[in-house]
Image (cartoon, helix red, strand yellow):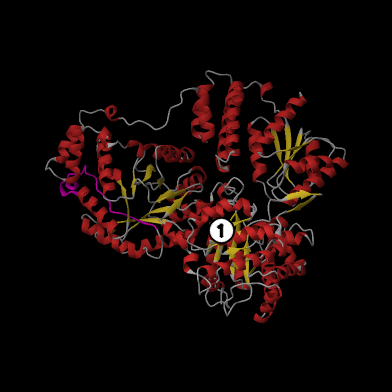
Amino acid sequence: MNFGEYLKKKPVILFDGAMGTEIAKQTKTSCNEELNLTAPEIVRSVHESFINAGSNVIETNTFGANRIVLAEHGLQDKVREINIAAVKIARQVCKFTSSQVNKLQKKNNLQTCKPANLQTVFISASIGPTSKLPSLGHISFDEMVSAYEEQASILLEAGVDLFQIETCQDILQAKAAVVACRQSFRPARPQASKASDIPIIVTVTIEKNGKTLTGSDVETAYTALAPLGISAFGLNCATGPLEMEPYIARLANISAIPIVVSPNAGIPKIKDGRAFYDLTPEEFAGSLADFVKNYGVRLIGGCCGTTPEHIKAVNRLAGYQVTKLQKKNNLRTCLPQAWSRGKRANLQTGFISSLYSTVNVVQEPRPLIVGERMNINGSKEFREHLLGDNFDAAALMAKKQADMGASLLDLSVAYAGRDEVSDMAEMAKRLNTLSILPIMIDSTNPVAVEVALKSLGGRCVVNSINLEDGGAKADTILNLTKKYGAAVVGLTIDKEGMALTCEGKVKIAKQLLRLCKDKTDILFIDPLTFTLADPKAAEFGSAKETLEAIGKIKKIGGRTILGVSNISFGLKPTARRVLNSLFLHEAVTRGLDAAIVHAGQLLPLHKIDKKALKLAKNLIFCTKKDALHDFIAHFDDITPKSAQFSKNFAKISDIKGTLTEAVIGGDKEGIKKLVGEAIKKKQPLDIINNILLPAMQKVGVMFGNGDLPLPFVLQSAEVMRHATDLLAPHLKKENVQAKGTIVLATVRGDIHDIGKDLVDIILSNNGYKVINLGVKQPAEAILKEAVEKSADAIGLSGLLVQSCLVMKDDLKILASRDVTIPVICGGAALTKKFVETELKKAYNGPVYYAKDAFDGLKIMALLAKQKK
């Protein structure tokens, strides 16, 4: 029995606990994966302890065994050797017979539901997040896929039973890992009948603020990753089960695939210089048993701090819970269908997402508004930005459309004389972290479509496919939507061209629905409409045919979308607003699901004068012979002013307000003009101290409250930097001196630098000189630089629990050299209590705890004041 079959039959599957913290009990190492070669007996003993505790699945010691991470340890040439050794160790340990399993069950009084032909223990290939995040520009999607595919291919060849992509902090990184694992199936391992039988499960890490490091909530991560065809999805690491429960509850309401949960054994604490997790096995097991009972969680295990005792307790309680549920429901089979899917399956109406948020494609009230202002052929502003290679300004239009009510953004960059693929790559890269709304990739070029799908972390919509060539090109696009989990738009075009009649449109819609059946679960049919400015289309009744087609396509089960503004192309702006508004209203009454339209240009019908409304109806429904002439004539004497629409956001007129909004909004394009205006009325230093710095402080508050994801903070910081650069030539020399100097470094053994680099940006923007040494820095190197540069402070950073202990060792080294330079310590695992009780005692000088980059800024300001 392979793991895929086992997953279908077993109600609850028990994974193992923490490899890393168990290894740490036996040895100190900077690279756990190297132990597969240097100390295999340690890895073997950890596997054995979890199997004896009752685990159905053990994870290979390969969490960081990819080229990216191993290169940090100088082991990049041992990727194959390390991964092969890891699977070999696990395979040796798993050679238990059924009788041995039965003995273990009797010995431990385990009450598990066991199919007759149970395979004893499965081997899961652990694949970690690496040390780089593509959404933050650390690495390209293709580079990440290449590294993952190398590792996955080796693991597959070695004989793993499933892939476990875990601790994902960036959904674009998780996508790369899934794509890589699927690509590794191509040269199927000899001993596997079908490589596609190898399931892929994915778990993301939700921080205490309810989001991943790059700002995705659990619904958004699920929306982006479930359509990739994974076998299970869930959460691991970061928190204990108590803190994780709210997100599991939310996931249980939407997930149509099995849920996997592997919490830590509580929140890590440090005592006597050592990290420990204080959740007892019984407490841990009780929470996981509740997950099984209350939320239908089916794959359970433990992450950091979970010991064999924790897993043994889970095995006992979860097994009891399964038996209890089966008796309660009088179930004859191991896996009741109602339990495996439950009410969740009925809630799947179709979702798309950006990196940050999820959008239901079925909006109430309808329709889903697709912003059209990032279309190079439809928006003069967007076109001017792109033709001037001003991609930053072009990307900022996403925020404007969100403010005007759009829920999805159409992106079209194909333009004669320009490289569509290059322009699409530039725009998609920026929109991934800038846009809170999902993106519709508007292109029929498969290369341009794929480059966008590689850059956008959320679940996109591809616009579009058609049957003009019989479906060959459509099939190519559909293979991409399946590979990257995207939705798609199908146009009612075949070899005869654009369908003109309702009957023709519906016929092609049926063909598209059949073609897309196994490639995507979301297909929008665009029945297309011609501009009524064309007398032939107006006379033929093109709009009426389109409206009728919408209703009939809905009846055959299709979702509908329409480029509403096409109906009025070529008419005056005032006439367009009236015609677009009425046409959209009529389309929605017939069931239109989504509309590509400039939401800010629409008018409520009650605000359109009755005569104009009547003339528009005559034109749309072709009720009068001269309907087009009459409609155009009516607007000849109307100026645009009479049809003005009101913006849904207030305009800020004061300098402080506009500059503040530009900083918070990340408006790098607009800041140049605003600074130019501000400097005419205020002193440069006044602008910095009383406008720009408070604006960044507001960004800090928003970041701390979880209202502003990390990428947005970085964008605001870049705008701040740009503004200060513009002001620098106007400052007197005595005013541009650095307020102080700090040496920043990630401590030895830690390769994480996102937090440190954010500190660099924030401090640099606020007038401090920052010497950023990078990652894995020993105390000697940090001290040398601090002394040579006469630093006012040293900043020690680290993400790992182990890094907190390294900080303590570093401070002892500095103390032994009689150094008293103030030291600021920060990192995800660090606590104020540890700084107060452990770090300060290890050092002769001041030691400060910085919760985040903005805390670091406050401390540097304090030090600068003391220096005076």
**How crowded is the residue under tag 1: few (<14 C-alpha within 10 Å), some, or many (20+)?**
many
- Residue underneath mark 1: 234
Residue 495 picture location, percent across and down: 26, 61
Q: Out of 628 and 675, give the one closest to the viewer.
A: 628
Q: Out of 361 and 241, give the one closest to the viewer.
A: 241
Residue 527 sits inside the magenta stretch: yes
- The residue lying furthest to the left in this view is 625
Taking 28 as reference, is 576 left or right?
left
Taking 455 as reference, is 855 left or right?
right
Residue 73 picture location, percent across and down: 72, 57
Q: Out of 116 and 569, give the one closest to the viewer.
A: 116
Total label count?
Answer: 1
Q: Residue 241, can we see it? A: yes
Residue 196 sits inside the magenta stretch: no
Rendering quarter of residue 112: bottom right
Taking 340 as reference, is 766 left or right?
right
The residue that appears at 63% across and 55% down in the rendered structure is: 241
Quarter holding the N terminus?
bottom right
Vertical position of residue 199 compared to residue 839: above or below: below
The residue that appears at 37% across and 64% down in the rendered structure is: 517
Vertical position of residue 266 compared to residue 600: above or below: below
Q: Which residues are magenta?
A: 522-541
Secondary structure state at the residue bearing disc 1: strand
Q: Residue 59, can we see it? A: no
